[in-house]
Structure formats: C-alpha cells, structure tokens
Image (tube, grey):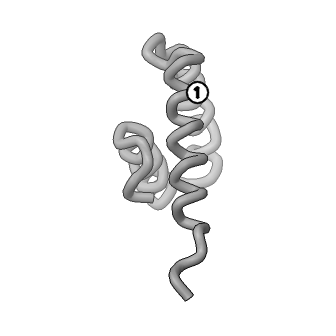
Amino acid sequence: MLSAHEETLKQVHQLIDFGCEHTLAEGIPEEARRSLAHKLNEAVTPETLEERRGTVIGRGRAQTKPGPA
C-alpha cells in the first residue's frame, strides 16, 4: 500500500478517517461527493490512468514472484 500513488493514498486515508468519525448515513454521500470530484479532476486523463494501471500491475507482479528456493 505504501508504494501506491501518493495523492490517492492520502485521499483514501482521509475517507477512512471520515468513516471512523461519522455514521454510514453521513459516509455514503461523502464518498459519492469525493468520487464525483475525482471524476471531474482534469488532471486525471486516460494517459495518467494507463500509467497508474501499469504501475499497479508491475507492483503486483513483483510482489507475487516466488523467492529463491
């Protein structure tokens, strides 16, 4: 998790903290609001998503490689 995209990780932690401090009824609309804000973020382009996807796939492959026998 520490090797994830820094800004995304920060936002996920903020949402978790919000969830710990509020009710489910308050959390659902907050999650929807943040999701919409993320979708409207002009910095998130198909190219940046593809780059991040490649990073996640590479990290997953590195983590599942068998170690030395």
**Depth order, front residue of 40/64:** 64
Q: Is residue 67 visible?
A: yes
Residue 36 x %, y %: 59, 23
Residue 5 located left or right of residue 68 = left
Residue 2 x %, y %: 38, 57
Q: What residue is at 43 percent from the left and 15 percent from the top? A: 43
Find the residue positioned furthest to the bottom.
69
Quick one: quadrant of the C terminus?
Answer: bottom right
Residue 49 located left or right of residue 3 = right
Residue 7 x %, y %: 36, 37
Relative to 26, residue 52 above or below: above
SS at badge 1:
helix
Q: Is residue 33 visible?
A: no
Q: What residue is at 55 percent from the left and 46 percent from the top? A: 56
Q: What residue is at 59 percent from the left and 75 percent from the top? A: 66
In this figure, what is the number of numbered marks? 1
The quarter of the picture where residue 65 lies is bottom right
Residue 58 x %, y %: 55, 49
Three-letter amino acid code at disc 1? Answer: Glu
Q: What residue is at 56 percent from the left and 26 percent from the top? A: 49
Quick one: quadrant of the N terminus?
Answer: bottom left
Dot 1 surroundings within 10 Å: few (below 14), some, or many (20 or more)?
few
Residue 36 located left or right of residue 15 = right
Residue 22 located left or right of residue 3 = right
Which residue does the numbered mark 1 point to in the structure image? 50
Find the residue positioned furthest to the top.
42
**Depth order, front residue of 1/52:** 52
Find the residue positioned furthest to the front.
69
